[in-house]
Amino acid sequence: MTLPLLLFFVFGAVAVAAALLMIFVRQPIHSALCLVLVMISLAALYLLQGAEFIAAVQVIVYAGAIMVLFVFVIMLLNAGNEERTNFSKMAKYIGLPLSILMTAGIAIWVARAGSVLASPQHAPDTAEPTRELSQLLFHTYLFPFEATSILVLIAIIGALVLAKRDS
Amino acid sequence: MEFVSQHPVLVVSIIKIAVLLFVLMTALAYLTWFERKVVARIQSRLGPLYVGAHGLLQPLADGLKFLFKEDVTPPASDKVAYLLAPFLALTLALTTLALIPFGPATFNILGQPTQLGISNPSLGLLFVFAITSIGVYGVALAGWSSNSKYPLMGGLRSSAQMISYEVSLTLSVVGVVLLAGTLNFDDLIGAQSGRWLHFIPRWNVIPQIIGFFCYFTSAIAETNRVPFDLPEAETELVAGFHTEYSSFKFAMFFMAEYANMITVSCLATILFLGGWLSPLSSHWRWPLYLPAAGLLIGGAFLLYDALARNRGIARIQLTVVSAIALVFGLLCLIPAVMVVIQGLFWFLLKVGALIFFYVWARGTLPRFRYDQLMDFGWKFLLPVSLANLVVTAFVVLVLNR
């Protein structure tokens, strides 16, 4: 077994285990930390595919910015352990079978497409994917990209307006 | 032996990691000594004096003391996060240094050409920012998991501060990246080689002086040092986020703080001060002898100090230290070593100067108030670094046309 393949299994296992833990752990901060771990192991998987830029951005944006905000809010609210209820009837008879069906569907799809996914499209070249990505973002899809950023700005201003309303 | 021949890169990396870790840990320990001595001088005191000659064994004594203190875990704390926080802080602080190149020279270990640095990815700068951006968790978790009000306040303050200043830190660096057009540390330093008017080095400090100011100010805030050490303001918050930590867990936070200082100074050296490039002209031959001369003169002075002014154990200790300095000085005279050591010498000299600046600031400046700190970050530093970025981008665009 080659080293990259071994690392793939290690980080894949960590990602899956952390994702499961995130759901089953009862303390919200622990859940958030598990989510951070998922993000970081996903970044490691990107790195194994040779996508250095995406890996770094994944860590900076998700683990370093968004999840910090989550942890911050949970800390400020001082949220206690989450309460568990027994499954409702809806969840038991519809939700559970549906989710199992969906997982099975995805598994079958991945297994069929596996031969395509397993073979890398091109050799990991470090500088070129970043260049391609920036070409796409700042040339081909410049307008949607800028429109999205304005949308985010509007959302931030909206949140400020809503928060300031009381005072 | 077969394993070595099969995986030369892996083995060489592990050797380099071990060496770097050893050097780094010693440097961290003696950085505390250096800081205490310098601050003592600024305040007209003598600093550590009794443990060993000139207090040279003080770091060792401190380390032993940390190891043998009782390790208290507050009963109401969140055990997992409480244990995780110091490990996270120290690990992330040390990991960043794996990406720093300390010198240009390639040399051979086990028939494998290597660099003075552990790893050199093409997006080095981005990876450093990725690792430092997770560094907030160590502090935030420490504050929250202690389940006590001073640590919580300290942790919240410090994470808010780190997030705020990270913005201007990153923006101030983008100017340099635009000038060099790369994120790789080697290329970033290479872009600074050459001279203006044949004698001024083309370092980024000169065109990016505003960027350097923004970077270093936010770096001090990012590492929670005076005058931005609000998270651990003793008069208000006892010891801030690490109030409830004792024994070696406290020492880990302490080491993480100093490791962060080193990382930030290394980055400033690479980005703005030309990394391992020498400020002196390459036509001269005498700068090649500078590292050796420095070590030999220093060693000789120490030897004089040991024999003329000290007695007993202190005399033996100082003689040993001076002997080490003299041996290294003589080693630096060997032509092969001399070439390898040049880059390292200038790099460490610049990093040392920046760290001295840090300590100087600590000895001189009073602490900010919290609202002043936030105002300074968001209303002054951020606009200035943004303006610097826009102007730099404009100039680069015009010059490239």
Image (tube, rainbow, N blue to C red):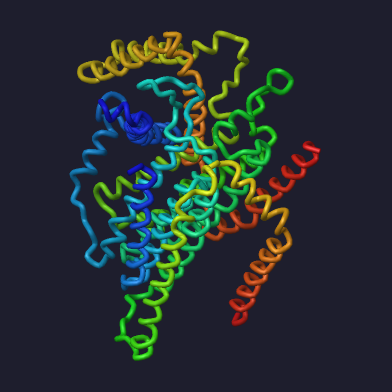
Q: Position of residue B33 (x, y in %)?
A: 35, 33
Quadrant position of residue A77:
bottom left
Q: Quadrant of the C terminus of chain B?
A: top right
Instruction: State which quarter of the image contains the N terminus of chain B.
Output: top left
Nearer the observer, B191 or B233: B191
| Residue B328 in view of the camera | yes
Rendered residue at 28%/14% (across/down): B319
Residue B150 visible in the picture: no
Q: Residue at x 34, y 91 (%)?
A: A89
* Residue found at x 67% / y 66%: A148
Residue A47: where, in percent of width, then height? 47, 48
| Frontmost residue, B182 versus B59 | B182
Q: Nearer the viewer, residue B179 or B200?
A: B179
Asked if residue B301 is positioned above or below residue A64 in the image, the reply reads: above
The percent coordinates of residue B351 (x first, y second) are: 49, 31
Residue sticking out furthest to the bottom:
A89
